[in-house]
Amino acid sequence: MPHSQPQLQCPNLRCRAVNSDRDQFCQKCGTYLPKRFLWVVGARVDNFQVGDLLEDRFLFQGPRVVFDTQPGIPLKMSVELPDTLVPYLKLFPYRLHLPQVYTLLSLGDPEPSLILLLEQAPLGSADLDPSHQGGLALGAGMPLFDAWVNAQPLRQLHWLWQIAQLWQPLRIQGVASSLLQPDFMRVEGSLFRLLELENDFRLEPSLADLGLVWQQLIPKTSGKLADSLDGLCDQLASGEVESAEELLAQLESWIENIHKAYRVKIDIATRTDTGMVREHNEDACYPADGAVTQNSLERMAIVCDGVGGHAGGEVASGIAIEALRDHLTQLPIDDLSPADVITELENASFKANDLISQRNDQEQRQDRQRMGTTLVTALSQTHQIYVSHIGDSRAYLITTQGCYQIMVDDDIASREVRLGYVPYREALLQPASGSLVQALGMASSSVLRPTVQRFLLDEDCLFLLCSDGLSDYDRIDMIWREELLPLLQGGTDLASTSKRLIELANQLNGHDNVTVGLVHCHVTRQRQSTGATGLNSAPAETSAPVDNTPPTVLPKTQAVAPDAPLDPKRSGSGFGLWILLGLILLGVGGAVAYQLGFLKLPFLNQPIADSSASPSPEPSLPDTPPPPPDLAQANKLDVLRLVSANDQPIEISVVKDPKELLQGIGGVDDASVDNPPTETSDAKIALGSTISIPSDSLVVVDGIFPPPLADASDKTAPGAPIQALRIRTCQPVEEVSEQEGTGILPPEKLDEKLEKEGADPDADSVAQLIDEKLSDENPSGSVTTPSTPQIGWVDRSKLASLVTEIIPAAQLSPEQQKACTPAPLEGKDIPAGAPIGSDPTP
């Protein structure tokens, strides 16, 4: 009997209350309700209709999509997994790109058949029946060939790069044909994912076959990339590109060339806590607990979870942090190849393992007494992130499209799946399924197998590193939308988010130590296109270069349709040529007449006026002021120059949460941008803080709200106008350019500075500087820029009248870049408007 409205049974076996599929928590006991939409594979799938129940549990909500109405009931297959499905298990480490076996059902009526249910498939709302599309969103899964047209060249190449990365492992398992099926190839934002796998059945797919599939993308590709991709497909078809390694090398050279037009900024925060039960904290992190660093001042984050008790685990995690820090910080990371970076990450793990093992041997620790630690590391290099992993501490990738577990735990359950024995859900039911099979310090480095993955960056994203004190019981899947997604959308900051994650871990779990590391990646396209040289080796960006000339201000007139182009034969071009020739002759004649004295030009014969003389009474036309910059065109990391009327000090009301501004001005609409806020909104803003700076100061645009579209090339997608900007003050450029890092002028410039400022060069220089410092400490009515930046969200309309210039990040001078680069933050909550690094306590 068809069921139109899905009902979800509470996974708490002591409750098992029935809830609506729209409930996030059980209405009776408060347990989190997981929503599992599964992709159905089988010969008899077409026999079912939307609303049918499969095995009294799985409800069809689309032609190939079912919803698990009893997620708390353990899964155990009643039939043995066929050999044709074993590749799903052996490719478990590639779960970021591939679906996983949820269970296998055997249907006996009217004839025996198997139905495979896959989880973590790249589903989208289009996979649901139209009558169910108004309910819960499945995700952002979209066919590759549909998404290709509106994607930027960098993302298009990123998708191809991921396909090339998957080619060899899928070929080894006999399912490379999956990469030749357009219906199976989907994308979720920057990620390439497969909907299901297809067996090769003794066929041997080649790179030439892959080239034929990619040729279908060429008509959907614009600009120079189309020509380059066409040439690459010809090389694949002819066998000139013989291996996946050669293909990857070609794609990476193109990606690196295009990425020159982008800027990547990395912010890192860490925090650790003992938890609610343990007496000692055996976890460790790098940077140190509570640290927040901005703009790549730190290039890596590390999380370790020690094992072996207070006398062991705490020591082991500390040794690992120190070993990795000492090894990796000494390397010229940006000068290393990707293969070298991966090797060095592995070597750093081996070094840490050897040091912990030596400590175990010195203290004669055996078997379970040996101390060890898990390890997860994120390391940035230009436009990419490397994640290294040993043990069961986890790494997650969070984008605006979803939350993805990157690594597979090094435990017994995952080992059973990788060996092709049982699906993961069933492996979790085995005794000791969570026991570790490897960790630092437990065995020789010769048997240690670190996992290193490399991620290219083409959009803002977040990497979360955490110990199992947070990730246990699928807590990340439960909280990421409410707690982590706002960080990508500019609604919160790293310090607040890291603190909140610790609080939630203690509240929802609390049984263990908890440590988090957040790596926030900002990817911004520069305004000026770098272009590409050598099209045979790299395609260029297809967008037109930015014209930096000031725009021409046209009078506001009624729009007129353009005339049809004139026939060249009737356009009067000959008459125009005669006019041009006449003007040239007239100019030459005038010059000759002036030289012979026949022509007097009064304004050239007048003497130069003395600067002390009174101005000429002759009227002159006033200069037309240049149009003010349009803040709607401001991008993240642009620098704004703020100038007040009469050079008076500037005071700007800011808040910590941009939503307070939108509530104060009545939401997002055009009227709120053009009209000044009411007194009610002023009162709302006054609840925040105030930034005070001198006139003619620089501030950095640290955030935009509402955030811009993820793919700016999609012109048809709706985008809300900018309503609020998150600004950060810069130091005075003069101060930065004249002073060294210690804040003291070098001796050879001291006399020059004193003489320039009218001081006596023969007097005691140090005494004069002290007097000058005391007299300028806080002059009456003046405002000085704090040595540490101030930061906060401000209403765009309130800022517009102060902005005289928008400087793109790519056009900053070295002095301006230095003045606007923030110092590392300490790990405290930062109130809006307060100097960064200051004590937030009122």
Image (cartoon, helix red, strand yellow):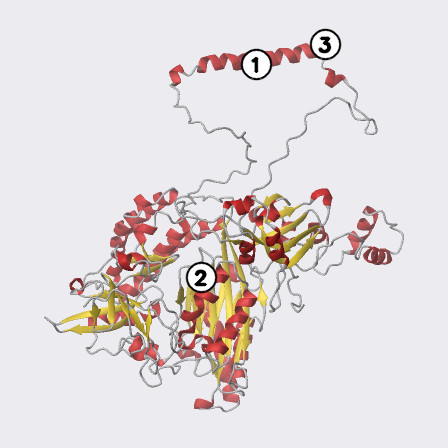
Disc 2 target residue: 338
Instruction: Identify which residue, 288 or 237, lies in the foreground.
Output: 288
Q: Quadrant of the N terminus?
A: bottom left
- What secondary structure is found at the residue carrying circle 3? loop
Task: Kindly identify the amino acid type of the residue bearing the numbered disc 2.
Answer: Pro
> Which x, y percent locates residue 480?
44, 67
Q: Classify 86 as above or below 493.
A: below
Q: Mark 1: which secondary structure? A: helix
Amino acid of disc 1: Leu
* Image location (x, y in percent) of residue 170: 28, 64
Q: Earlier in the sequence, mark 2 or mark 3?
A: 2
Please tell me how crowded label 2 is: few (under 14), some (14-19), or many (20+) other residues with Cα within 10 Å: some
Eye-nearest disc, 1 or 2: 1
**Does residue 796 appear to the left or right of 136 in the view shown?**
right
Helix or strand or loop: what does disc 2 sit on?
helix
Q: Around disc 3, counting alpha carbons within 10 Å, would you say few (fewer than 14), some (14 to 19), or many (20 or more)?
A: few
Q: Is 510 placed above or below 643 here?
A: below
Closer to the camera: disc 3 or disc 1? 1
> In screen coordinates, is 314 left or right of 136?
right
Note whether residue 40 is visible. Answer: yes
* Residue 812 at least partly seen: no
Residues at marks 3 and 1, CA–CA distance in whole angstroms:
21 Å
Q: Nearer the viewer, residue 245 or 719?
A: 719
Q: Which mark is residue 597?
A: 3
Q: Amino acid at mark 3?
A: Gly
Neighbour tally class for label 1: few under 14, some 14-19, many 20 plus, Cα within 10 Å: few
Q: Position of residue 532 (x, y in %)?
A: 45, 44
N-term mark: 1 or 2 = 2
Outermost residue on the left side: it is 110
Give the mark nearest the N terminus, 3 or 1. Answer: 1
**Residue identified by numbered label 1:** 583
Residue 705 image point, x, y percent: 52, 54
